[in-house]
Amino acid sequence: MSDGGIDLDELAAAYAYPERKPWLRGNMISSLDGAIRYKGNTGALGYDTDWQLMQRLRGLADVVLMGATTIREYTEYPAGAGALAVVSRSLELDFDGPLFTEAPAPPLIYTCESAPPDRLRAARARAEVLLTGEDSASIPAMLRDLDARGLHRQLCEGGPTVLAEIAAEGFLDELCLTLSPTIVAGAEPRILNGRAIDLQRMTLRHTIRDGDYLYLRYTKAE
Ligand SMILES: NC(=O)c1ccc[n+]([C@@H]2O[C@H](COP(=O)([O-])OP(=O)(O)OC[C@H]3O[C@@H](n4cnc5c(N)ncnc54)[C@H](OP(=O)(O)O)[C@@H]3O)[C@@H](O)[C@H]2O)c1
């Protein structure tokens, strides 16, 4: 695989948020056959430029949003992120780990009434916890709350389950996809996975090539 040595500033400049607020951008990488990872490892699909761009996109956003399964893979605060929002039912998160203890501000955790009380207590010691539903956090209520906090430019880094829920509720304004020059096969999930949605037509905003990698940016068709 080759990367073409694209200028990172030039690449990042193509990702300015639009004026409209709020705006929710998803950013994902997939193999040519649509897999989100190889043998459980998302990093296997990417390379340095993709990693650097992800950090730049975090810097452009007011808040970075992740599902609990994705954030459980992080041992440290996501590099380049300002505010962090996590959605979880179980609250099985390492609240004593650096992700929470070294966060620049307490992360926002969106959860539900059915969350285990002991986990709720642990979460509240390290994060701002919001209950936005009974058995699941309401995605629309979560996004309205982020907007009300002035966190208008939203970046969801997945995973596929949360991204599918966001799309199903009609909130996915934009999808940035890095197409990795790899074939994975097997049974790895797609970049949106789980909840079914009505067919969503998207409009291509840019295609940027870096060697064998493609950076695609689509917005929701009007
Ligand atoms: N290729 C890429 O660009 C990319 C990007 C991101 C992630 N990934 C990969 O994707 C995998 C994880 O994705 P995933 O789809 O399994 O999980 P995910 O979307 O990261 O997180 C799913 C979890 O989020 C919580 N959740 C989701 N909807 C909720 C709701 N409405 N209310 C409350 N909690 C809710 C639940 O957490 P609890 O379990 O705590 O209840 C659920 O188990 C990892 O392997 C990661 O490496 C790949």
Image (tube, rainbow, N blue to C red):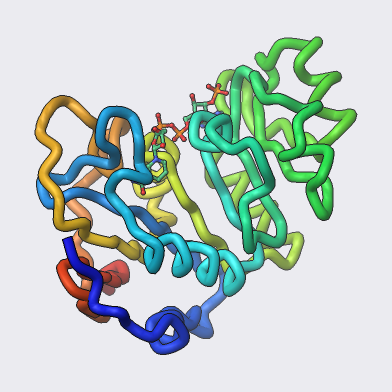
Horizontal relation, residue 190 to residue 145: left or right? left
The C terminus: image quadrant: bottom left
The answer to whether residue 120 is seen in the rendering is yes
The answer to whether residue 173 is seen in the rendering is no
- x and y, in percent, of residue 73 in the image: 53, 33
Horizontal relation, residue 74 to residue 27: left or right? right
- Relative to residue 59, is residue 87 depicted above or below? above
Locate residue 49: give its quadrant.
bottom left
Which residue is farthest right?
125
- x and y, in percent, of residue 17 in the image: 50, 79
Judging depth in this view, the residue of 56 and 109 nearest the camera is 56
Locate residue 64: give its quadrant.
bottom right
Count of all numbered marks drawn on residues in the image = 0
Horizontal relation, residue 220 to residue 67: left or right? left
Q: Which residue: 14% across, 38% down? A: 184
- x and y, in percent, of residue 41 in the image: 35, 35
The N terminus: image quadrant: bottom left
Q: Which residue: 81% across, 45% down? A: 102
- Relative to residue 49, is residue 107 depicted above or below? above
Q: Which residue: 76% across, 30% down? A: 97
Q: Which residue: 21% across, 67% down? A: 213
